[in-house]
Image (cartoon, rainbow, N blue to C red):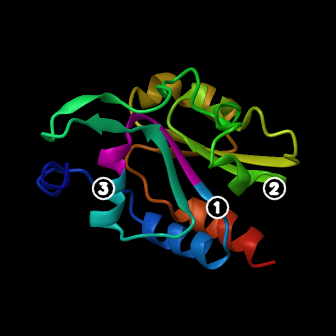
């Protein structure tokens, strides 16, 4: 997995490293929900951005045989319909967010808006939508549903300046 990630063309949005550093400094837990493969995500973060003590990846973990061959996946499968806080109950990740009443939710589909569902303590949820394709077709709906919309490969500048620094530095 490490070799495949190191040879891949994956990159994070400009400014993600700044956002992660601010959140780690303020001891804000960061949970990355993905219907993808956790092993790949762990390597992508580690190789491209480094390690962050507050970062947890909630995704599909590969299970390997003694010979190093993928034999399946561990735990419950994470998919578009269950990637959210409700799936955290009873897991080691839940204690990291229990009792927190503010959520910064970032997602690239309208279904991601439900990721904070199940957090009974939440008071404020700020949402950031990444509109990556069919921009003209989907812009109006994203603007209606998300608080902030970043189009294409736009940087995290709006999140970092407008939200993180304004809120966390108070």
- Residue 87 percent across, percent down from the top left: 64, 31
Q: Name the chief secondary structure element in magenta.
A: strand
Which residue is tagged 2? 100
* Residue 30 at least partly seen: yes
Residue 1 against residue 90 in the figure, above or below: below
Number of marks in picture: 3
Q: Secondary structure at mark 2?
A: loop
Tell me residue 39's x, y (percent).
32, 46
The answer to if 38 sits in the magenta stretch is yes
Q: Secondary structure at mark 3?
A: helix
139, 121: nearer the viewer:
121
- The boundaries of the magenta stretch are 31-41
User: Which residue is pictured at 16% across the width and 58% down the height?
Assistant: 6
Q: Which residue is mark 3?
A: 44
Q: Could you say where residue 158 lies in the image, as x and y percent from the top left?
A: 58, 61
- Mark 2–mark 3 distance (CA, rounded to whole Å): 28 Å
Label 1: few (<14), some (14–19) or many (≥20) C-alpha neighbours in 10 Å: some
**N-term mark: 1 or 3:** 1
Cα separation, mark 1 vs mark 3, equals 19 Å
Quarter-of-image position of residue 111: top right
Contact between marks 1 and 2 (CB within 8 A): the answer is: yes
Q: Quadrant of the C terminus?
A: bottom right
**Is the residue marked by circle 2 packed among few (<14), some (14-19), or many (20+) residues within 10 Å?**
some
Q: Position of residue 89 (x, y in %)?
A: 71, 36
| Contact (Cβ within 8 Å) of mark 1 with mark 3 | no
Q: Residue 29's mark? A: 1
- Position above or below: 155 against 39: below
- Residue 82 in the figure: left or right of residue 121: left
Q: Is residue 140 visible?
A: no
**Label 3: few (<14), some or many (≥20) within 10 Å?**
many
Going from N to C along the chain, the mark reached first, 2 or 3, is 3
Identified at 66% across, 72% down, the residue is 27
């Amino acid at each position: 997995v490490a070799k495949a990630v190191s040879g891949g063309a994956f990159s994070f949005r400009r400014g993600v490293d700044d956002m992660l550093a601010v959140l780690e400094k303020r001891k804000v837990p960061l949970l990355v929900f993905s219907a993808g493969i956790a092993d790949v995500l762990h390597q992508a973060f580690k190789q491209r951005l480094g390690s962050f003590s507050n970062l947890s990846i909630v995704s599909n973990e590969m299970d390997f045989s003694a010979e190093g061959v993928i034999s399946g996946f561990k735990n419950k499968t994470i998919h578009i319909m269950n990637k959210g806080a409700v799936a955290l109950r009873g897991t080691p990740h839940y204690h990291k967010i229990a009792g927190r009443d503010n959520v910064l939710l970032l997602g690239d589909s309208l279904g991601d808006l439900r990721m904070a569902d199940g957090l009974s303590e939440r008071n404020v949820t700020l949402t950031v939508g990444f509109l990556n394709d069919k921009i003209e077709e989907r812009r109006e709906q994203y603007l209606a549903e998300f608080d902030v919309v970043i189009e294409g490969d736009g940087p995290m500048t709006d999140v970092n300046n407008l939200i993180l620094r304004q809120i966390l530095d108070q």
